[in-house]
């Protein structure tokens, strides 16, 4: 079936009709939630800079640059002692109950990084509608020119109808080069693909709208000083293809 949207990041600015360049901004300040990024000849470059603040210091020193296709205050309840800090308008720029997603990305092989590609319940109908299809998590220590491990599956979060179902799949690919990470889902379950090949199927059903979330994380070693010369840390999103079937 044809794609509804093919995003190649060919314009000088990120499209506000599709992308929100903040990670869960309701839980933190806009400065902490704001993505660092650039549009380059290769696509959307997500970046962690040396001077970037932690996302939420209460939960640790990690930093994130992130884009998402929807927002709802209170969604994705992660962390301790949560309270809404920065109320934001509800937005559903792209959500789907069924459909397909493919993200072509290249990631760093840096020991403190992770690139995440997730489909997350937008909780429009209920706070239970919070499950996730984890298309791919690519941790820098598990990335090399000879092989890379893709973490993938389903996360229940606060959805009592789901159970966590996560796999680490070693693959003979160099994830520092562009590869396509995708998912298809409907009322029968979901399947997850890498470069068009199915690597995991699940009969768990997320029967509510899902939004796409793409992010680059840095998880620094505890008490390890940061070397300013190592920054920026970058990952590139070369293309995103989206189709909503319901």
Image: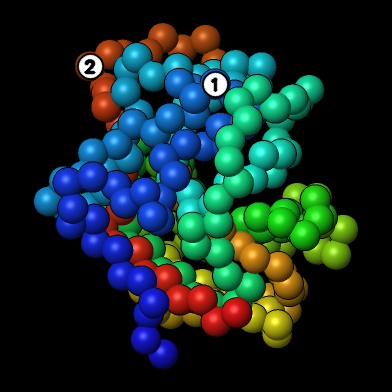
Residue drawn at (68%, 79%), measured in percent from left and top?
189
Q: Secondary structure at mark 1?
A: loop
Can see residue 180?
Answer: no
Residue 195 picture location, percent across and down:
36, 73
Is residue 90 visible in the rendered image? The answer is yes
Give the residue number, with chain letter if any, for mark 2: 229
Q: Quadrant of residue 129?
A: bottom right
Element at label 2 = helix
For label 1, the crowd category at 10 Å Cα-Cα, with few meaning under 14, some 14 to 19 and many 20 or more, is: some
Question: In the figure, 49 relative to 107: above or below?
Answer: above
Q: Is residue 233 left or right of residue 32?
A: left
Q: Position of residue 136 (x, y in %)?
A: 50, 58
Mark 2 surroundings within 10 Å by alpha-carbon count, few (fewer than 14), some (14 through 19), many (20 or more): few
CA separation in Å, label 1 and label 2: 27 Å
Horizontal and vertical percent for residue 135? 52, 62
The foreground one among 41 and 29 is 29
In the rendered view, tell whether residue 209 sits above or below residue 83. below
Q: Which residue was labeled with disc 1?
A: 29
Q: Residue drawn at (27%, 27%), measured in percent from left and top?
A: 232
Image-based side of 43 in relation to 185, left or right: left
Instruction: In the rendered view, tell whether residue 238 sits above or below residue 44.
Output: below
Residue pictured at 45% horizontal, 21% vertical? 31
Residue name at image x 87 percent, y 58 percent: 160
Where, quadrant-wise, is the N terminus in this rendering?
bottom left
Q: How is the image coloured?
A: rainbow
Disc on the earlier residue, 1 or 2: 1
Location of the C terminus by quadrant is bottom right
Q: Residue furthest left?
A: 41
Query: In the picture shown, does residue 79 fall above or below 213?
Result: above
Side of 6 relative to 138 (left or right):
left
Q: Nearer the viewer, residue 177 or 148?
A: 177
Nearest to the observer: residue 87 or residue 149:
87
């Amino acid at each position: 079936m044809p794609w509804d949207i093919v995003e190649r990041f060919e314009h000088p600015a990120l499209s506000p009709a599709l992308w929100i360049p903040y990670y869960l901004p309701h839980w933190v300040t806009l400065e902490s939630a704001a993505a660092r990024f650039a549009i380059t000849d290769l696509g959307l470059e997500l970046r962690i800079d040396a001077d970037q603040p932690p996302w939420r210091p209460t939960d640790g020193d990690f930093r994130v640059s992130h884009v998402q296709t929807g927002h709802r205050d209170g969604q994705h309840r992660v962390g301790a002692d949560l309270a809404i800090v920065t109320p934001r308008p509800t937005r559903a720029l792209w959500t789907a109950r069924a459909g397909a997603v493919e993200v072509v990305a290249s990631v760093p092989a840096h020991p403190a990084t992770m690139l995440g590609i997730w489909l997350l319940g937008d909780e429009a109908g209920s706070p239970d509608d919070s499950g996730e299809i984890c298309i791919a998590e690519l941790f820098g220590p598990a990335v090399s020119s000879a092989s890379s491990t893709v973490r993938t599956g389903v996360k229940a979060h606060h959805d009592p109808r789901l159970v966590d179902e996560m796999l680490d799949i070693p693959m003979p690919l160099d994830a520092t080069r562009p590869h396509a990470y995708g998912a298809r889902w409907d009322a029968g379950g979901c399947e997850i693909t890498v470069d068009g090949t199915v690597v995991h199927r699940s009969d768990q059903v997320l029967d509510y709208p899902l939004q796409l979330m793409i992010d680059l994380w840095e998880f620094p070693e505890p008490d390890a000083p940061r070397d300013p010369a190592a920054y920026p840390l970058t990952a590139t999103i070369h293309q995103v293809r989206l189709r909503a079937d319901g």
